[in-house]
Image (cartoon, grey):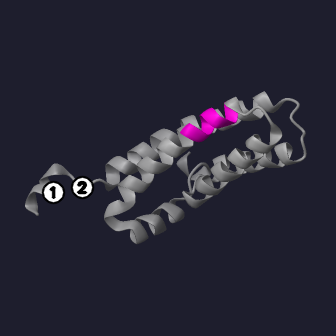
Amino acid sequence: MADTHLDRDVLSALQEVMEDEYPMLLDTFLADSEERLVLLHKAEDAALLMNTAHSFKGSSSNMGAVRLAELCHELEQRAKNKNLSGIEKLLGEIDGEFAIVRPLYEAERQRSSPTEATVRRF
């Protein structure tokens, strides 16, 4: 199931590059994503919706959240074309996808965090 939602190769590459900062990157992505979801739901015009969706698409793509990036791209395009009818359904899909990937990232965070025993050795 996770493979349709997360690109594990992207996560592996990020972990290799970020090393000890990788868990913080995961935390930052989750926190930023929550803020972006709030902004998407509060957006009162197409421009704000488009910009927020664009930003969320980029961070999702960079973090390997494949389906989330696709949904944000769709929202960005609809906002760009000012085609906002039925947008609530798409926002619901974005919420649902984030609800799926959030625990996957949290599990990745737990997996990648140094254990207390490892920390004590240093």
| The N terminus, quarter of image | top right
Residue under the image location 83 percent in, 43 percent down:
79
| Residue 75 shows in this picture | no
| The C terminus, quarter of image | bottom left
Which residue, given by chain and number where applicable, does mark 2 sit on? 114
User: In the rendered view, does 59 fall on the left or right side of 42?
Assistant: left
The question of residue 39 being in magenta is answered with yes
Q: Label 2 sits on what residue type?
A: Pro
Q: Label 1 sits on what residue type?
A: Val
Which region is colored magenta?
35-41
Task: Give percent across and percent down for residue 6.
Answer: 56, 53
| Pointers 1 and 2 in contact (C-beta within 8 Å) | yes
CA–CA distance between discs 1 and 2? 6 Å
Which residue, given by chain and number where applicable, does mark 1 sit on? 119
Residue under the image location 65 percent in, 46 percent down:
68
The question of residue 73 being in magenta is answered with no
User: In the rendered view, does 121 fall on the left or right side of 31?
Assistant: left
Task: Give percent across and percent down for residue 77.
Answer: 83, 49
Badge number at residue 16: none
Which sits in the foreground, 72 or 51? Answer: 51
